[in-house]
Image (cartoon, rainbow, N blue to C red):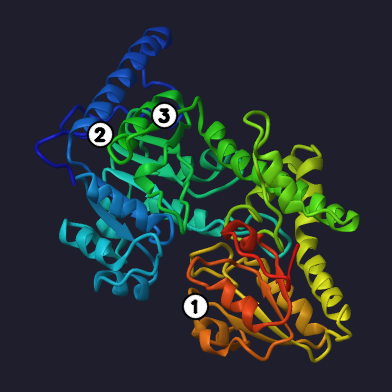
Amino acid sequence: MIGEGAVRAGTAANAPSLVRASGGEPAGGDPSEDAGVDAAELEAAVARAERFFSTARWTAGVIGLGYVGLPLAATAVQAGLHCIGFDVSPDVVERLGAGHSHVGDVSDDQLRAALDDGLEVTTSEERLKDADALLLCVPSPLGRNRQPDMSYIEAAAATVGRVVTPGTLVSLESTTYPGTTEDLVLGQATVRGLELDRDVFVAFSPERVDPGNERSTADIPKVVGGVTPLSGRVAAAAYRRIVPSVHLVSSARAAEMTKLLENTYRAVNIGLINEIAQLSNQLGIDVWEVVEAADTKPFGFQAFYPGPGVGGHCIPLDPQFLAWRAREAKFATRFIDLAEQVNTKMPDYTAARIADLLNAVAKPLYRSKVLAVGVAYKPNVDDDRESPAWDVLANLASRGADIAIFDPVVGAARVRARGYEAVEADGLAGFDIAVVLTDHDVIDLQTVADRVPIVFDTRGAYRRRGLRADNVSTL
């Protein structure tokens, strides 16, 4: 939808389409002369597109209404744009249309406000033909062998190929390996004979959602890179209408690499502190005290904290996109591989520490009653996918422990769906040990320590909250 009389670059209202002939060269004339004219025409098309996306009330088409796409769609509407949100799941679209959000970062009230302001949610690809920008926000998981599963991005790109119209910006936001936008999206964006930088503009802008924290999509700067510098300029103009801060890089590959660097940096440093935590325990040193002391240095140090493993949709997965791409290039990612080895072993290390604490009071792990406190992948979110808590509990269960879970944020229904007993706040007594795996703010940790004889705090939560109890041990 083109609003308020504005005209997109590449549309018939601007000028006849100037798509190259099938051979890839300008049709007819002196090649050198055409090259100069071509460059001028491309610059003019880009300038028109920049002006349109900077000033018009254009329509964003968000493909995928999950934890990335739904906040982006709501933010676009809040910024005064039209938005068509597309998802292949009828159940998701039906719930969203009724004002029920399935994403923690978008409340029901925020969703209903966006719907009132014109957010359209649909399962119809045809509606995306009215979009001026197509923003791809689909999952990019790893497969069984920890290789990138590109099927969702490929499906979204194929949708682009069926609905793209002249003047459209196409931007991929899903985390992926460097080169994906060129490999999988560019061809579909131009499959209908549209010429890059004249009729269609293609870019990558990595999602940077921060579930469970107060930062919203509008608060987080956007990195943007086009498959060409011209496409990058158009994408930057469009994203500046959605978020106040946009950082334009030289290419889509640079933007793709930026996202992987951000989370690989975290994974490697978490691997380091997890190893330091194990060594500190061997030496009888409190690693939490050490990190707290080191963090007083005002330069050259950033605090990372140990835990029972790494979880979520980013840190355990994103470095593997880079490692996979590196293997293709015959390059060894030694830091990434070592960090993954350390981090993936932390659930087993955590389970071993639990067994040691029970052994110290003459209790075997077998048939001991273990209370798991929190199972989400991070505090204050209800998302338990990729959570290391499940790996810890699977280890304990395989050794005969009797496990129950207290997590008021994830909820009893999801705990039971995983095959575990769920307890409420009034049912914390009667356990041999409590293990704090996720420290939600709503959990009263003092009560846990008062009711359970041994507490193993894998998150340093008691120290951080200023709570002291003689029966609490730390990772």
- Packing grade of label 3 (10 A; few <14, some 14-19, many >=20) is many
Q: Amino acid at mark 1?
A: Pro
Label 3 – label 2 distance at C-alpha: 13 Å
Residue at image point 29% right, 54% down: 74
The residue carrying mark 2 is 53
The residue carrying mark 1 is 408
Element assignment for label 2: helix
- For marks 3 and 2 on the same chain, the one whose residue lies earlier in the sequence: 2
The picture quadrant where one finds residue 115 is: bottom left
Q: Which of the numbered marks, if any, corresponds to residue 257?
A: none
Classify the position of the C terminus by image quarter. bottom right
- For marks 3 and 1 on the same chain, the one whose residue lies earlier in the sequence: 3
Instruction: Give the percent coordinates (x, y) of residue 37.
Output: 33, 12
Q: Is residue 48 above or below residue 158?
A: above
User: Viewer-proximal residue, 369 or 100?
Assistant: 369
The residue carrying mark 3 is 232
Instruction: Give the percent coordinates (x, y) of residue 95.
Output: 31, 74
User: CB atoms at circles 3 and 2 under 8 Å apart?
Assistant: no
Q: Amino acid at mark 2?
A: Phe
Q: Is residue 32 above or below residue 422?
A: above
Element assignment for label 1: loop
Residue at image point 33% right, 68% down: 101
Left of 105 or right of it: where is 322?
right
